[in-house]
Structures are given as C-alpha cells and as structure tokens.
Amino acid sequence: MEAARHHDCKTSPDPIFELPAQCMTPTAAPIVIDNGSFQTRAGWAAPAAEFDSPRLLFRSVAARSRGAARSETQIGNDIPNLEPLRWLLKSQFDRNVVVNFEIQELILDYVFTHLGLTSEGSVEHPILMTEAPCNPLHCRQMMSELLFECYRVPFVSYGVDGLYSFYHNNQRNLQRPNTGIILSSGYHCSHILPVVNGRLDAVNSKRVNVAGSQAASYLQRLLQLKYPGHLAAITLSRMEELLHGHSYAAVDYHEELEKWRCPEFYEREVHRIQLPFSGKVPGGCVSAEERQERRAQQLRRLQEINTRRREEKLQQDQERLDRLLAVQELLEDGLLDQFHKSLMELNMDSAEELQSYINKLQLAVEQGRLKLLQSDGAEGKMEVRHILFSSRSVFQPAFNMAEYHQLFVGTERLRCPEILFQPSLIGEDQMGLMETLQYVLARYTPEQQEALVSNVFLTGGNMQHPGMKERVERELLALRPFQSHFKVTMATRPGLDAWYGARDWALEHPAAAGAEGWISRQDYEEKGGEYLSEHCASNVFVPMKLAKPVPARPAEPPAALQTLTGASASAATVTAAPAPSSSTDSADVNMAAS
C-alpha cells in the first residue's frame, strides 16, 4: 500500500473585506459569531446569496510574546504554523467557557476589522453570539459588558451552538415545539442537551469532559510511544489532522480490535502516513569510492602512528639495555668500585638484580623487533582486505529515508474516537457519552423518554468520524427496552450548522427593542449584564438571588437599668465610665437599685 504523503496545513492571512452595502440598508444586518473553543466562525445574517456562508473561519488562538505591544499579537490565520509558537498560544476559553476576556477582545477586534467595520468608537450592528450550555452568569455579564461598554453595540443575543444546529436541521417542524435530545461533542467537552417542548431542559443537561482535544492528545501519545525516533515530528497539529482524516468510530469496539489481529485485514486497513523529511544525508554528496578512500587514508594514518610509537619504545629499551650491559662489563673487568657506584646510580642492590633487568630488556627488544616486522607484513594484508571489503560494501542496499519516516496508523484509528464512549482508556474517571445519556433519560417518565429518543440529534466537530451514527444506534439498542423505537440523525454539517442555525434565527427574528431573544442597551443598563432574553435556542435565564444580610438589632438593656432610666433620682446616681469592667457595671446597678 502506497503511503499517503502528509502536508502540514499552513494557513494564509484572512483578507479584510469591504463592508457590503446590503448590510447597511435598510437596517444594519446582524453579525453572527459562532464563538467556538476550536474555531471561530463569523459572517453576516443577510438574505443575499453571497452571505450564505461564514466569511471568516480561524482558530480561536492568539500568539503574543510577553511584554509585546497589542498590535504585535497574531490572531487565528495570521499564524501560518502553530507548532513553532505553541508555547505562546493563548485562548479565551477554559474548556468551553470564556474566562480570558483580554484574548476575547482581541478576537472580536480581528472579526470586526476583517468584516470591514470602520466606525470609530462603536459597532452599529446587532451581535448574535454563541455561548456554552448553562453558561455561568458572571461570564455572560463580562461578555455583555465587553460588547455594550467597549463596542457600544445596539443589541446582543446569546444562544447555544448545539441548539442552533438542532433547529437548523429541524426547520420543517418549527410550527410545533420540538422535543428531542442533542449529543454535541466539540473540541474540549461533550454535552447531553434534552429539549422538551422546544426549550432546553437545563436542569437535566450534562457535560462530559472528553472530546476532540483529548482524542488528539491520546493519538499523539500512542504514536510517540510507537515511534520514539520521531518524537519531534509527531506534533499536536499533525495529530489533529490525522484524527480528522483517518479515524473512525467502531460499531463494536472489541470485535473490531479482533479483526486487526488478522494480517490480511491489517495490510488492507492500515494507513501509511509519510512524514516530511530532508533527503540530504550527512555526507550524502560524497560518492562511495571517495568514502572508501577516506577510510583507507585513516587506516594508513593509524598504522603509521602505531609503527612510530613501537619504534620509539624499541629505541628507548635498546638504549637502556646498552647502559646495563656497560655496567655489567665493569664487573667482568674487575672494576668493583666503579661497578658498585654504577649500581647505586641505577638504584640496584646486587649483580643478580642487574642480570634480571638485562634479561627482561633483551626479551622486550626482541619482541619489539618482531612486532615491527609483523606490522610491515600486515599492512599489505590489510590493504588487500580493505579492497575486498570496499568491493562488497558497494553492493549493500542503501538506507531508505522515506520508509524510515513513515507512520503506520492501525488500531489508533479506532482507539482515539473510542474515548468518547470509554473515557477510562485515557485515565478519566467519569461516565462515557452513552452512560451519561442513560442517566439523563432515567430522570424522565417513560412517555417523555419515548419522545426524547425519537429525535436523537448528533452535532459538533467531534461527531464527524465515520461510523459515529451507527455506534450511537447500537448503543441505544442495548439501552432501550425491547421493541422500543428511536431515531438518530446526524447534522448536515456537524461543524458548521451552529453558525447556519444562528444565521437562520437572526433572519427570522429581527433585532428590535423588546423583541424575543434580543438584549437592548436599555435592558443591559436596567437589568444588568447577566440578563438573558430567552428564545428557542438559548440557555434558561436563572436570575441570581443574593441573600442580603439582615442588620443586627441593638441588644436591649437589663430590666433593672430600664427601671432606673425612668427615675431621675436613680439616674443621677449612675455615672458612665469610659471603659468599665463587667464587675463595676453590676456593682453600680446594684447600688442604684438599692
């Protein structure tokens, strides 16, 4: 199977569009912003065909060095490659909730600038923005404060991305309230959102902290353990692309793993991914003959060094031997005084010790001469052996750099999406998506359960894996009673239908004072930033009730003291000290009472 060449996804900067005239007359068209934790999508809610799709799609990240100016911040598609700047990336989200409003302001500046808004000091268009299910009131308050105070927008509307996608795909049933249950899985977390009679049942909504980012990190960890030589090449950005393009959800996880044990199935289903690599090998421009010649030169140089060292050692041993033999001749000539004097200079005690040193040096000199003769003969043999070895090495197969930089993605294709149903695979101690769905359904009556499972809706970018709908159907078949009916539908565009649903809602509900779903500046000033105008795709507004502390009532004086205060004579006898003790107070009262 031929390897699929992997190309790193490099984005190009977004153009700065001109403000369309259709978006200004007769009224200002709303700006629809799907504020996702993975990707931000922004566009116009205008009836013209050219506004049918979002104009801006970019990653929800900003890169700015510490201490850099605000103008030096890179947003979204202005960052061509995320990996070199991974340590600088900042997001406005903590999981799926906006908490960093400084980054959120930079994102909104980027959106308004590239949509062509040039008005000074204010944005004259209504803003429709998505938010997290059951968004905390403080986060909505901060977002409303940012939009109304900083950008001075006239109207704001908030909605849940999963609900917008749900109503976009159920438009033909809008005449009557819809009932169903939404399984939404995004980048940081997944949600179970029951919809009863057209409104979100926020009390029974649940969140699972497993989604696309955990799957990408799991895939990165698996491949880094499998290919420890390519740790730097297995980046998170590449793993996200592999996850989107090569993963699938197994209908039966354990049965599918058994299939991968078969060699034929493995060869047919494994995906070979070719990583980028440099074809230049160190020394690759040098021919084989030149490399062999360099090796021969190094070998001859080493041999010359060893021969020189042996000759120097042989010469030193010979000189020492000649000196010792000269001392021995003094003994043979009978010059005992000179002989003993020479022995003292050599640090020797007797003639026997001198004779033993002479024997050792003679043996060392003979061995040194033999080694020199052998090295001269071995040099020719080494050259012949080197020539034979070089002739054989020329025909050795060359190292294939392309095959070395290939990733074989096998069972990882189904193991990563499986964490949505089994979070324990990555060490998460929580229920999977279908277990959470079973827990939510158990909180309703059997009749309500039938109505909910008759419209199970899948949406979100992490639901785009092939086989996801079939897996949910199989899990529901095991969860539901015998012969019960259910229906599972997938969003037409799971990653984009939230924006399309928000656009459709904005076209059907124009912004106006008192209109359903829209918050005006007057509402913001009167009801506070956490106020939410509910509609069919919004959260449920639960006003924050703060218990005001009741002021403590002053303690009543003792009865004896009250009696004394009524009589002027008794009161005249009581004197107030600056800081009296308890014993003094009681003594004064007793004296007055007597």
Image (spheres, rainbow, N blue to C red):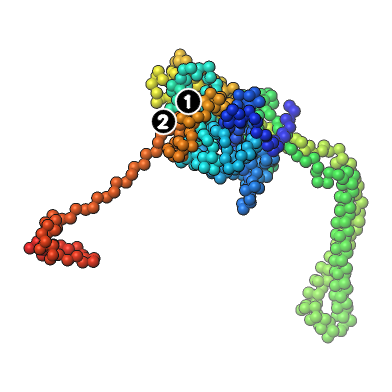
What residue type is disc 2 on?
Val
Q: Is residue 369 above or below residue 212?
A: below
- x, y percentage for residue 372? 89, 60
**Is residue 340 rendered to the left or right of residue 507?**
right
For label 1, the residue is: 536
- x, y percentage for residue 581? 21, 65
Q: Earlier in the sequence, mark 2 or mark 1?
A: 2
Q: Are marks 2 and 1 in contact (CB under 8 Å)?
A: no
The crowding category of the residue bearing disc 1, from other C-alpha atoms within 10 Å (few below 14, some 14 to 19, many at least 20), is many
Residue at image x 48%, y 17%?
175
- x, y percentage for residue 22? 63, 28
Residue at image x 55%, y 25%?
507
What residue type is disc 1 on?
Cys
On the question of residue 370 being in view, the answer is no
- Using the image as rendered, state which of residue 513 and residue 323 is in the foreground: 513
Quarter residue 395 falls in:
top right
On the question of residue 102 being in view, the answer is yes
Quarter residue 449 falls in:
top left
Quarter residue 560 falls in:
bottom left
For label 2, the residue is: 203
Residue at image x 60%, y 42%?
120
